[in-house]
Image (cartoon, rainbow, N blue to C red):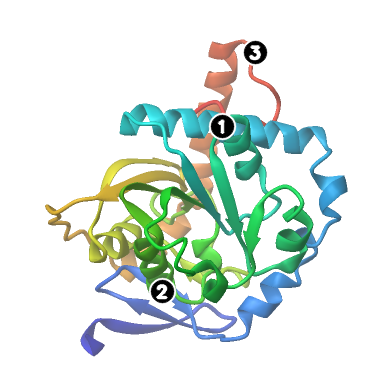
Amino acid sequence: NPSKILSFNNGYENLIFCGTCSLLKKEDKSLELKVINLPKFNFDVEEFISTQSYKNQILECKSQLKKIFSITKTKKNKALDFGCGYGSFMFACKDLGLTVHGYDINKNFTENLAKYFKTFDSKKNLLNQDNINGYDIIFCRQVLNLSQNVYNDFKIFDQLLSSSGVLVILDHVKNFSKYKSIITQNNNNTVLLTTQSIEFYANNFGLKKIYLKNDFGDMFSIFMRSQKIDYKGKISLNLLIKLEKFSFFFMFLSKFKQVIKNIYYGGIIAPGVELSL
């Protein structure tokens, strides 16, 4: 609906806001290549996965998987890490006995992880007949904020997810976020997500939220197929701009919360592992 489209300039570039799906998007079409070439995505994979911090990431992913199984009341057998990066979720799946595949557009990841897992470096290869409706769980972590087309990503989720499958999305959202965003910064993200935009796209493909936690901008959400969906949530551009102004306050609350948790848990949690999901 053209009447729901607003233009916005953050001082660096032009952005487009859709009032229907509550999504703010950059107009730059070359960002995908820029993201692939970022130094943080091109470390030596073997060296990176041998570090202690990486092993802590695997522990965190295993904790997340156990939480997913607990919420959905099932244990899944076949998983896809959509935007696998350095593969911590895949190693966690392997440790828990799941068959797992990885997809990423960065060949540094797919080629170097191919010795451990089956990987795909293009959506065309990923969408082969063997994979259609073949995954019990799709894990998408900090990927959609870098996406060129969020709608197409959800379309792929719909094609690959089994009838009883689970879609898990972990990403940054603007709702009560401690993070600055493309509203005021010139960063590498292509879109600014909200909990409303995530639910909007999921619902368009018959996926209903069964769990969502927003920890000052760090969202953990789980979706499953459903015939009964009636979500009409929206958020305005003006409200997003106001939330951006209060990011410092949400950061303070987040740090205060972490201090309380550290005191409560007595420092028994391994460094680098989240205290809650």
Q: CA distance from mark 3 to mark 1?
A: 27 Å
Identify the residue shown where x is 47% and y is 62%. Answer: 130
Q: Nearer the viewer, mark 1 or mark 2?
A: 1
Mark number displayed over residue 128:
none
- Place of residue 78 in the rendered image (x, y in percent of width and height, measured from the top left): 48, 45
Q: Which picture quadrant has residue 53?
A: top right
Q: Is residue 249 above or below residue 41?
A: above
Mark number displayed over residue 152:
2
Q: Is residue 266 above or below residue 255?
A: above
Identify the residue shown where x is 60% and y is 43%. Answer: 89
Residue at mark 3: 268
- Place of residue 4 in the rendered image (x, y in percent of width and height, measured from the top left): 24, 81
Q: Is residue 157 left or right of residue 83?
A: left
**Which is more toward the observer, 98 or 59?**
98
Instruction: Look at the image and tell me whether residue 277 can be seen.
Output: no
Q: Is residue 155 left or right of residue 103?
A: left
Label 2 secondary element: helix
Nearer-N-terminus badge (3/1): 1
Identify the residue shown where x is 51% and y is 76%. Answer: 148
In the rendered structure, which amino acid carries the disc numbered 1? Gly
Characterize the local packing of mark 3: few (<14), some (14-19) or many (20 or more) Cα atoms within 10 angstroms: few
**Which is more toward the observer, 116 or 218?**
116
Residue at mark 1: 97
Count numbered badges in the picture. Answer: 3
Instruction: Look at the image and tell me whether residue 216 can be seen.
Output: yes
Q: CA distance from mark 3 to mark 2?
A: 42 Å
Q: CA distance from mark 1 to mark 2?
A: 30 Å
In the rendered structure, which amino acid carries the disc numbered 2? Asn
Characterize the local packing of mark 2: few (<14), some (14-19) or many (20 or more) Cα atoms within 10 angstroms: few
Nearer-N-terminus badge (1/2): 1
